[in-house]
């Protein structure tokens, strides 16, 4: 699979704008400051296809990137306290529409900051996916911010916390150093049956 061939296709900010799914989809979910755009850019080997911002909560739309045989879907980040209630409601409706519209979602990559592990909303998201039988894997972002001992300790702790959701693949990831890129690409290719 040629990840570098990804092209931006469309952004939708409201539930009624979402078009029907005609390709398998790999979605990326996580808190607004967890590094989704950075991960996507590293994954596809491009510097700025997905917009990276220094301001958390910047991705407020569902963004679709076309790879011909599938789509990568950048879901809006959740959990940013400065977002007004109306915006949180819009996000909730958008997510319900995305996950409830019969799309061919092969895998959701749930991003967690390796330094902190899953918070309440991360657990809610993983519980939802487990309950709905949506396959997901976990990418532990910012792993380069930890030394080897801290990294092993956090990996063990987080893996222990998420066992309640099933046998979940966990990949430590660094958008800076490239750790986990090949593993994540492999998980995506397996989910698409392309390996």
Image (tube, grey):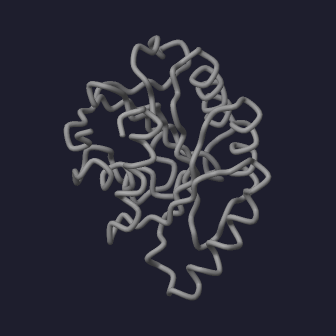
Count the marks: how many? 0
Q: Nearer the viewer, residue 140 or 171?
A: 171
| Residue at x-position 22% and y-position 40% | 2
Quadrant location, the N terminus: top left
| Residue at x-position 79% and y-position 52% | 164
Left/right placement of residue 173 relative to residue 160 reads: left
Q: Nearer the viewer, residue 87 or 195?
A: 195
Res 193 → quadrant: top left
Quadrant location, the C terminus: top left
Q: Horizontal and vertical percent for residue 5?
A: 20, 37
| Residue at x-position 55% and y-position 44% | 29
Q: Horizontal and vertical percent for residue 145?
A: 47, 79
Q: Horizontal and vertical percent for residue 158?
A: 68, 66
Res 189 → quadrant: top left
Left/right placement of residue 1 relative to residue 152 reads: left
Left/right placement of residue 122 relative to residue 60 reads: right
Q: Nearer the viewer, residue 58 or 63?
A: 63
Q: Nearer the viewer, residue 179 or 7?
A: 179
Q: Horizontal and vertical percent for residue 105?
A: 52, 27
Q: Is residue 42 above or below residue 2?
A: below
Left/right placement of residue 88 relative to residue 74 reads: right
Q: Is residue 88 above or below residue 122?
A: above
């Amino acid at each position: 699979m040629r990840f570098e061939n990804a092209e931006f296709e469309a952004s939708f900010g409201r539930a009624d704008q979402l078009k029907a799914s005609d390709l398998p989809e790999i979605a990326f979910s996580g808190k607004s400051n967890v590094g989704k755009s950075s991960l996507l850019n590293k994954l596809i080997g491009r510097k700025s296809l997905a917009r990276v911002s220094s301001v958390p909560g910047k991705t407020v739309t569902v963004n679709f990137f076309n790879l011909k045989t599938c789509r990568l879907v950048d879901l809006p980040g959740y959990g940013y306290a400065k977002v007004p209630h109306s915006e949180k409601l819009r996000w909730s409706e958008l997510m319900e529409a995305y996950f409830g519209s019969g799309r061919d979602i092969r895998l959701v990559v749930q991003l967690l900051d390796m330094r902190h592990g899953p918070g309440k909303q991360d657990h809610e998201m993983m519980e939802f996916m487990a309950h709905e039988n949506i396959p997901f894997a976990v990418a532990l972002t910012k792993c380069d911010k930890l030394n080897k001992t801290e990294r092993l300790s956090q990996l063990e702790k987080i893996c222990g916390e998420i066992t309640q959701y099933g046998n979940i693949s966990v990949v430590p990831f660094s958008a800076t150093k490239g750790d986990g890129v090949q593993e994540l690409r492999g998980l995506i290719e397996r989910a698409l049956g392309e390996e």
